Amino acid sequence: MDLGLNDDELVACVSCGLCLPHCPTFVITGRDTESPRGRIALMRAVQNEDAPVTDDLIRSMETCVQCRGCETACPSAVPFGHLMEGTRAALAGAGRITPRWQRLALKGLRHRWLLMAGSTLLALAIRLRLVPTRRLGLPARMPLRRPPLRTSGNDVWLFTGCVMDAWQRDVHLAVQRVLEAAGVGVEPTGAAAPCCGALHIHAGLESETKDMAHRVMAGLSGDDRPILVDAAGCGAALKDYGHLLGTDEARAFSARVYDVHEWLAGHLDELRSRHPVAPLDLTVAVQDPCHLRHVQRAHQAVPEVLAPFVTRVVALDDDGLCCGAGGAYSVMEAELSRAIRERKTAAVARSGASVVASANPGCSLHLAATGLDVRHPLELVDQALSSSRA
């Protein structure tokens, strides 16, 4: 089977093993087939040696969280994320992964009205205790109503996306208030860019992801405004449109995309001069979402932005190991996801923090399901700014 992978990228891995301590599945299972080098060896065997696509190979690929922690550790700069995305696209195209129910669920993210209606029904079912939220990795409560997002200017776009807008619109509202406090006019993207396609590319649905990328680019065309993103997974997907589509237009679009903390770090002095505040009396542990730390490489901006607004910011001592959320991974591979999460919650306990700051909705929901107090970093900044105004 031809996986359509770049042979130069495949042979770049020399199986040195430096990635192993940074792979959450290998750390849990100890199996080489559930490590980056083991998975790449299987990709090579299928593409170049006509090895069959066995159930064991499928299992190896399906258990990958796609956290890309191996990329940060790799001295040879092996683009594991792109190799995994290509492999999953080939397997999904052959009908070997991504079942029909998952494809239908992901298709719904492309239709904003359907997502909002479905999320409202789900919120009602959760309130009536008709849904096993813990087993499915869903939040214990979801909003029945969502305050409207309003445009306050045209300095920047605020990318609102799909699931986060339906389930955590309060985060978008807090982020918008912080940006406005820095003197920035904000236009939420709303229906102009309903979904970035991050969950779809992870599932191997490459053609659908490309369609959504074109739709997002068309919706946000016509100016060069920065596109600020407050969800790490969405930011990583938007920044990768240049690679996904391979056009100059897509590369120019991706160059406009910033994680909101990355952008705000350059405007922090203005925010603080406009609104001097007393920091919140909190010790906050920063959990780096993998797509902020390993893909965007912008995670250092989070503690930089957060530090002036809380009494203490602490880093976790697990070297950024994945929390196990992985988009839909916590549903598709629930047992392994929970085992990975236990290592993260142990690191939080060792930190002594009372609050965890996480800049990605999947991570925050996954960790909050254990009882941790998890908030978006800019929710804490907004709280500090609000306290100063009271």
Image (cartoon, rainbow, N blue to C red):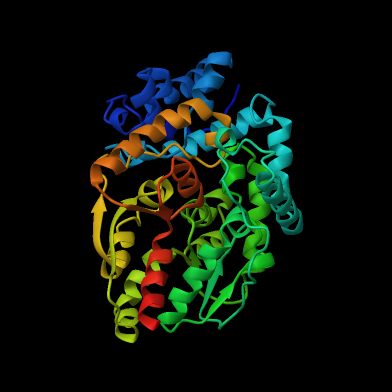
Q: Quadrant of residue 34?
A: top left
Please indicate whether residue 164 sits to the left or right of residue 64 in the image: right
Q: Quadrant of the C terminus?
A: bottom left
Q: Estimate the x, y position of residue 76 in percent, counting from the top left.
A: 30, 37
The residue shown at (42%, 19%) is: 33
Residue 54 visible in the snapshot: no
Please indicate whether residue 205 sits to the left or right of residue 374 in the image: right
The residue shown at (72%, 58%) is: 112
Q: Quadrant of the N terminus?
A: top right
Residue found farthest to the front: 128
Vertical position of residue 100 compared to residue 186: above or below: above
Q: Which residue is more in the foreground, 282 or 36?
A: 282
Q: Which residue is more in the foreground, 376 or 127?
A: 127
Vertical position of residue 18 compared to residue 117: above or below: above
Please indicate whether residue 262 sits to the left or right of residue 152 in the image: left
Q: Estimate the x, y position of residue 196 in percent, counting from the top left.
A: 60, 55
Q: Estimate the x, y position of residue 368 in percent, counting from the top left.
A: 46, 46
- Number of callouts in the render? 0
Q: Which residue is more in the foreground, 363 or 11?
A: 363
Please indicate whether residue 242 sits to the left or right of residue 280 in the image: right
Residue 93 visible in the snapshot: yes
Q: Which residue is more in the foreground, 34 or 275?
A: 275
Q: Estimate the x, y position of residue 98 in percent, counting from the top left.
A: 65, 31
Vertical position of residue 154 compared to residue 318: above or below: below
Q: Quadrant of residue 74?
A: top left
The residue shown at (30%, 43%) is: 348
Vertical position of residue 16 compared to residue 133: above or below: above
